[in-house]
Amino acid sequence: MTARAARYGGLPTERADPRSQGLDRLSALGIARLMNAADRQAVRAVGRAAPAIARAVDDVVSALGRGGRLIFVGAGTSGRLGVLEAAECPPTFGTPPRLVQAVMAGGRPAVFRSREGAEDDARAGAREVRRHVRAGDIVVGVAASGVTPFVRGALGAARRRGAATVLVTANPGVARRAAGRVIALRVGPEVLAGSTRLKAGTATKLTLNTLTTAAFARLGKVHGNRMVDLRPGSAKLRARAVVLVSEMGGVRARAAAALLRSAGDRVKAAIVMARLGVGKVEAARRLDAAGGRLDAALAPGRAGAGEAARGARGIRAGRRATGSLGARGRRAGPSPAAKARRG
């Protein structure tokens, strides 16, 4: 056995679970129940890691608040989970595509077809970071084993460029110096030994969901538990946006749809127009002054400063992404909000 084989063979993610040693002899129902029981371990592992996840959320908020970007780096299943998380942020939180990015070992083709050997190239990881990352960004490396060369190389290069770093791993024995923050998910061995697309992948997905949702909630991209910065790019999302404007603006659905169109599909602006009876230019001004926070825009006497306002200013670097309209725009006759109230 080579030294490298011995090193990988000792990883927690490579161990065999004695509870599933008869996997090939179980019925379909038996396998389903066994895997469901194992998946509950993934959820508990994320719960135990909550303090570490929270500290990483603070790091993400700090980086984005200063105008940095969030970049996921990974290989294989871990890399694809990063790609998925980055792809979901624009429609969910109205962020510009470049604010949350993903770097995948093997490039775009590896997202759809496995190129497992790409994960062994630490220099490629460092090279990709030099292409994509700048000082002030935050890089989240995702590696179930915690020792993936591509990810380790990327994290090292990120630190040298002045970026904050986080490592999400299913290996609790990984060195703490591997990144500025290490989120170790103690999921235990997989039902199918070594197949980290299972429990490790599930726990990783839960963790990445928490990182982005918590960070953007702290940055004013969420109001209550509603995604008020969503982009209505499909029939379903447009219907959701209309419901948001109707319920939160206190107007009927038809009026909400008209306000949404007038606001250029910006949900928060449409809500401000409905609630305060102002036009789109004034709604944009209020949201901009409030750092994009809907609660502050609706209650001008309350401060919209602090972490969320700073974060919104950082996110707007180069492009407004708070859900407010730009400062420019034509003032069009009577306020659509006034018509909405009559509707």
Image: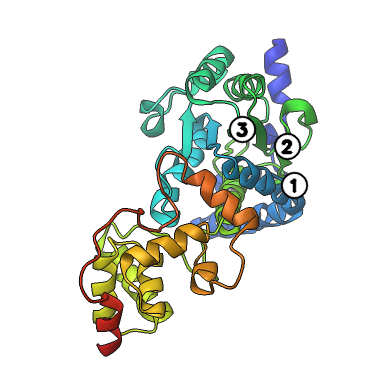
- Proximity of marks 1 and 2: CB atoms separated by less than 8 Å: yes
**Which residue is under mark 3?**
143
Q: Which color scheme is applied?
A: rainbow
- For the residue marked with disc 3, what is the amino acid? Ala
Crowd band around label 1 with a 10 angstrom C-alpha radius: few (<14), some (14–19), many (20+): some
Residue 45 visible in the displayed image: yes
Circle 2 SS class:
strand
Q: How far across and down, in percent of the image, does residue 191 sit?
A: 62, 45
Q: CA distance from mark 1 to mark 2?
A: 8 Å
Which residue occupies the extreme bottom position in the image?
342
Q: Earlier along the polypeptide chain: callout 3 or callout 1?
A: 1
**Which residue is under mark 2?**
181
Q: Quadrant of the N terminus?
A: top right
Q: Nearer the viewer, residue 68 or 133?
A: 68
Q: How far across and down, in percent of the image, does residue 122 sit?
A: 58, 15
Q: Residue at x 61, y 65 (%)?
A: 303
Q: Where is residue 15, by image quadrant?
A: top right
Q: Earlier along the polypeptide chain: callout 2 or callout 3?
A: 3
- For the residue marked with disc 1, what is the amino acid? Ala
Q: Quadrant of the C terminus?
A: bottom left
Q: Nearer the viewer, residue 160 or 287?
A: 287
- For the residue marked with disc 2, what is the amino acid? Arg
Crowd band around label 3 with a 10 angstrom C-alpha radius: few (<14), some (14–19), many (20+): many
**Which residue is under mark 1?**
52
Q: How far across and down, in percent of the image, does residue 160 sit?
A: 66, 19
Looking at the image, residue 94 sits to the left or right of residue 333; the answer is right
